[in-house]
Amino acid sequence: MEPSSSSDAEHSRYPASSLLTTHTDRNSSTTFGVASKHEAGLSATNPSDIVSPSTATSMMERHPNPTKHEQFWFHDGSVILQVESKLFRVHQTILANHSEVFADLFEVPQPPGENMLEGCHIVVLHDKEQDFADLLHAVYNPSYFDTLPPTADVDTVLHFISGILRLSTKYLARTLRTRCITLFTSKFPSTFTSYTQKSTSSSHERYKSDTVMSAISLALSTHVYSVLPYAYYCVARMSLKRFMKSDRKCDVNWETKCQCLVGRERLRWAEMSVSHSFLLVFQRAPTCQTLTCAHTRGPHAEWHILEAAKSPNPLRAYTRWSLLNVCRECEVYCQKVHLEGRESVWERLPSFFGLPGWETLRERERL
């Protein structure tokens, strides 16, 4: 996914209304090629398609008696947007200021015979009613993101951002999308520093399997690729019994599960050869003056305990340093080797699951 060189250039190649069509389900494929974000799932269409009489008629046939939204019906609004069974009367200028797609859409001349209500054109959008209401909350209330408690758990965060993230991606509302991604990565970190802060926090929470898989589906459908390596890491550490379940609506597809299973074996290798290698093959510190360190059995005994774990966890910090039974110089040396190994595992984490590197993932998620 390549970043836009300029807004004008982007619009000339891909009309903003291309995002008004139903979004391609990115969960149907997790292959990462070199395609741009448009080639990956966004079809280019004419802006007038979204307001065509046939489209509006079809929507109204499904929802023949739409009602005014209780909160987002402004008497001085300049356009009415129908989303499922609700009508939103809002201000074109406010939406246009937040969204490049709406800015272009409102410049399209309305076709003759278009449905109108109270002097406003009715524009039909193919979104979920609650998603659109969430988007409008973020658009009209500058402090809306501040209403989310700092201590909110992962389920609360995902529920809060899902609708906004989907539609800010679809309608190119860049500022809102960025704020959603910031909250997303607070739960699924994309840097080793943020991972360390999260894992050592006193409020560290355990994620349910369904939650992690829902997060992956959301990330794929909204092109937030930088959360995938850690999310896949969480899936790779799940029990094989959980892997085999396929009757849950939130589950990722089997292709993604296979990626995580392959990654699971690579994580085991990384734990043995990179992050916790100081236990399996203990080496004395260059400054060590204690001869008994060369014959200590502590590191190897600790490795056997680690090896017996149900799933690999190479990013986890080792803390049982006193059980190594080595001198202080060797202990400090092992701590240095361990930290460097964990950092190396983090840097390689995307590749364990067949993903591009961190920088490429971040580059591709930019609109």
Image (cartoon, rainbow, N blue to C red):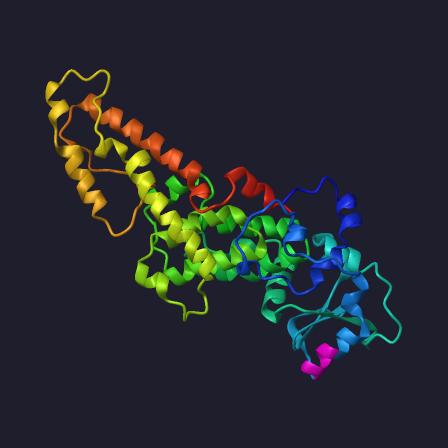
**Count of numbered badges drawn on the protein:** 0
62 part of magenta stretch: yes
Dominant secondary structure (helix, strand or loop) of the stretch shown in magenta: helix
Q: In this view, does 138 lie to the left or right of 278?
A: right
- Image height check: is 330 above or below 76? above
- Image height check: is 174 above or below 26? above
Residue at x 31%, y 44% (from the top left corner): 268
Q: Nearer the viewer, residue 117 or 114?
A: 114
- Image height check: is 115 above or below 302? below
- Chain part drawn in magenta: 58-64
Q: Position of residue 11 (x, y in %)?
A: 77, 49
Q: Which of 126 and 260 is in front in this view?
A: 260
Quarter where residue 69 is shown: bottom right
| Residue 30 makes an appearance in the image | yes
| Residue 63 makes an appearance in the image | no
Q: Position of residue 352 (x, y in %)?
A: 42, 43
Q: Position of residue 192 (x, y in %)?
A: 42, 38
Residue at x 63%, y 60% (from the top left corner): 167
Residue at x 13%, y 18% (from the top left corner): 290
Q: Position of residue 141 (x, y in %)?
A: 62, 57
- Image height check: is 26 above or below 185? below
The extreme right residue here reads 112
Residue at x 75%, y 59% (from the top left corner): 17
133 part of magenta stretch: no
Q: Which quadrant of the rendered structure holds the N terminus?
A: top right
Q: In this view, does 83 lie to the left or right of 251?
A: right
